[in-house]
Amino acid sequence: MSTNITKKLNKAGMHIEPGTKALDVVCGMELDPSHAKLHAEYRGEVYYFCSKTCKDHFVNDPKKYVG
C-alpha cells in the first residue's frame, strides 16, 4: 500500500495489521491490503479491489455489494 494511503488510514484511526487479508467484495478475490493499489471508502469502511473494473462496479453501486 502506498505510504500516502497508509498515512490517511492511520489518521482516520484505521490500521492494517500485518498478515491481514481483505476480500474484494465484487469478485471475491482475497487480497493483501498492504499491497492492494485500488481501494474505495464507503460508509466509513475501506474496501480493496483487485482491478479497476471491480472498483468501478463497486463505486457505481456500492449497496449491491455491501448492502
Image (cartoon, rainbow, N blue to C red):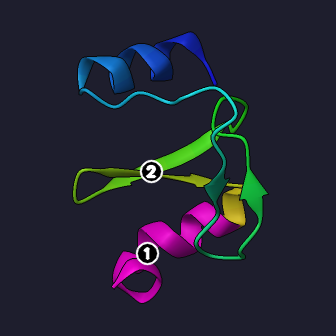
The relative height of residue 46 versus residue 60 in the rendered view (above or below) is above
User: Circle 1 is placed at which residue position?
Assistant: 60
On screen, residue 59 versus residue 67, left or right, reads right
Q: Amino acid at mark 2?
A: Ala
x and y percentages locating residue 19 in the rendered image: 70, 34
The relative height of residue 46 versus residue 66 in the rendered view (above or below) is above
x and y percentages locating residue 22 in the rendered image: 62, 53
User: Circle 2 is placed at which residue position?
Assistant: 40
How packed mark 2 is, by other alpha carbons closer than 10 Å (few <14, some 14-19, many 20 or more), is some
Assess whether residue 65 is covered by the magenta stretch: yes
Return the residue nearer the eye: 57 or 11.
Answer: 11
Residue 61 falls in image quadrant: bottom left
What label does residue 27 carry, if any? none
On screen, residue 37 versus residue 63, left or right, reads right
x and y percentages locating residue 7 in the rendered image: 40, 13
Q: Secondary structure at mark 1?
A: helix
Q: Amino acid at mark 1?
A: Asn
Q: Range of the magenta residues? A: 54-67
The residue lying at 54 percent from left, 28 percent from top is 17
